[in-house]
Amino acid sequence: MTTWKNNVRTVVPYTPGEQPKTKVIKLNTNENPYPPSPLVGRAISDLDLDSLRKYPDPSCSSLINTLAKYHSVEPENVFVGVGSDDVLAMSFLTFFNSKAPIFFPDITYSFYDVWADLFRIPYEVKKLDSDFKLVASDYSEPCSGIVIPNPNAPTGISEPVSFFENIVKEHPECVVIIDEAYVDFGSESCLPLVNKYDNVLVVRTFSKSRAMAGNRIGYAIGNKELIKYLSDCKFSFNSYTMDAITLKAGVASIEDDEYFKARINDVINTREWTKEKLKGLGFSFPDSKSNFIFAKHESIEATHIFEELKKRGIYVRHFSKPERINDYLRISIGTAEEMNTFIEELGKIIEGV
Amino acid sequence: MTTWKNNVRTVVPYTPGEQPKTKVIKLNTNENPYPPSPLVGRAISDLDLDSLRKYPDPSCSSLINTLAKYHSVEPENVFVGVGSDDVLAMSFLTFFNSKAPIFFPDITYSFYDVWADLFRIPYEVKKLDSDFKLVASDYSEPCSGIVIPNPNAPTGISEPVSFFENIVKEHPECVVIIDEAYVDFGSESCLPLVNKYDNVLVVRTFSKSRAMAGNRIGYAIGNKELIKYLSDCKFSFNSYTMDAITLKAGVASIEDDEYFKARINDVINTREWTKEKLKGLGFSFPDSKSNFIFAKHESIEATHIFEELKKRGIYVRHFSKPERINDYLRISIGTAEEMNTFIEELGKIIEGV
């Protein structure tokens, strides 16, 4: 009899946003509407084909050194992975190795509970208040780990560094992870905390602000001892996570800071324009500091708007759970032109109800 | 007081082979001496930069469909990952989820015990016989999983499919993983077993025979249910492991089967030439069916030869543990020209003793 299934780790996996295969306006996965820096393109096309036969540098030193210089830290403070999901998964595996629960918000990046389930890490979710804000006192009990995005997703709300510094200070017994996937779009970064505390890990990604979701690059910055533990686990899982082309592309992106800042500025301007238009159409939303807006209409159900937009080739994201965000849509910021079309179509949908 | 270290998973990571940064003859990491197919180069240079801003297809359908067609299986039988290390790590996590031990050989790929330690999987190593051959009866007790490379590394010895079929048949209670990293260099593949048994997983890599170590592509073929469990765990770890460029490069490699077979033929011819020359210099070795030779000199210590070769800019691999392979060197097959230089220098070293 087949009994191998008894030894299988069964899980309910994370469901990524839809990747439609036809041409649409894609405002559902918080991608950047602009291409990566032209230097990234050049780094890829200049590649020496023969070099691919060799294993890439397992220490990823070119990319790590570039990131360290950019953030004014030492290379030993930097860890890189296959997108920030890889960095976060490895961090959960490394740092949340206890029978006591970890804490994270109830409304947040929907991968945190998936990783906790995968690694059998107990967890407690802490409810955001009625304005979707983090409640500092919720995070003061002892625990075995904390993970919070800043700005939070899908709300877009950010908190000042002082908010996180208090949490980090209160928890010498565990590692506090600040997930800064969206920080470049106008929030304060917790990176300065890394020099003051040995139990804080700041996680970043190239997928949003650097327009490189297709390349898969994420990184973490923390004190050297923390990074050493993380690297040891990573080297016990897969020595060669970062391929040769990705390493080159990552370096090229960091080297073109002017382009990077200009495109972020474009996204922020379009976001602020979109906020005004959404208000005019009867939407309310927390003040987003990210590249998306989490919005609710005063009278029309989110599922109706979601379906009508989809019919018109415009994809946004709708989360059916938990119930109190059931009426919200998460709208990624596209180009000015895309958002113009989006607002026009949205106006027609609202008029048609 | 800092007590976060109590919650940390501490491990002894795998040590990859040296990646020297100066120009040398690199016969230490079983890389292919030839570049990947020119079609791979074209796929990379033809890339649309703008496409990188979007997440890659999380289902990796282009690559999975191409591999399925190539191996005459269904796409649901195929799983892809960031090198076969990623595929194997995920397989250990998914299938070896029990308190009973898993089995693997004592002399084998040195990552198996590292993964077992990382995931706290108990294991028993089974001793190869005095000719470094697998002993079938060692694998007949009930267990919670088995992993064996065919051909085995670093010995290069391969067994026929019937050897593995018996093991798979004897173990309906667990998943048996056949690690075929080197199978393309002249061994029988266990792929036909996938259609007959639901508990066998065959793992492959693009790093050796496809000369794409720099790209990081590995895959597994197994029955649909097995692949579903593996995918669920993978999607709980990182939804987007395979970047957009790597997916394209992988498809291009499979599509150039003529180039692939010609380069394998070159490596096999050079291996057989090298065997003759090594014999002439007083070396003995198991009959390798891989892209390396595991050789011992009749009188000179391996560490001496290793150091002397290194001085001459030729890197081979030496494993100090276990003790009974202390006198062997693992020599990857380079180009005909590289192996000629290697044999010449080796001759001088032996003369000089």
Image (cartoon, coloured by chain):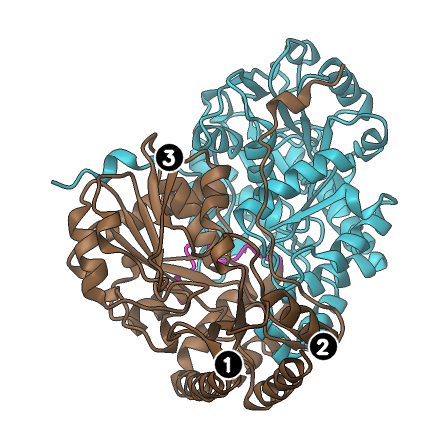
Chain colours: A cyan, B brown
Measuring 51% from the left and 33% from the top, which residue is drawn there? A110
Q: Amino acid at mark 2?
A: Gly
The answer to whether tags 1 and 2 share a subunit is: yes
In this view, A11 is above or below A104? below
In reply to whether residue B246 is colored magenta, the answer given is: no
Name the secondary structure under disc 1.
loop
- Say whether residue B99 is left or right of residue B199: right
Between the residue at mark 1 and the residue at mark 3, the CA separation in whole angstroms equals 57 Å
- Say whether residue B186 is left or right of residue B36: left
The residue tagged 2 is: B313
In reply to whether residue B58 is colored magenta, the answer given is: yes
**Range shown magenta:** B53-62
The residue tagged 3 is: A12
- The chain containing the residue under callout 1 comes to B
Query: Of circles 1 and 2, which is in front?
Result: 1
The majority secondary structure of the magenta stretch comes to loop
The residue tagged 1 is: B282
Circle 2/circle 3 CB separation < 8 Å: no
Q: Is residue A259 visible?
A: no
**Relative image position of residue B242 (x, y in whole percent):** 51, 58
Between the residue at mark 2 and the residue at mark 3, the CA separation in whole angstroms equals 51 Å
Between the residue at mark 1 and the residue at mark 2, the CA separation in whole angstroms equals 22 Å
**Relative image position of residue B277 (x, y in whole percent):** 50, 88
Circle 1/circle 3 CB separation < 8 Å: no
**Relative image position of residue B51 (x, y in whole percent):** 59, 64
Measuring 43% from the left and 56% from the top, which residue is drawn there? B108
In this view, B260 is above or below B180? below
Measuring 36% from the left and 70% from the top, which residue is drawn there? B183
Name the secondary structure under disc 3.
loop
10 Å neighbourhood of mark 1: few (<14), some, or many (≥20)?
A: some
Compare residues A33 and A120 and report the one nearer the observer.
A120
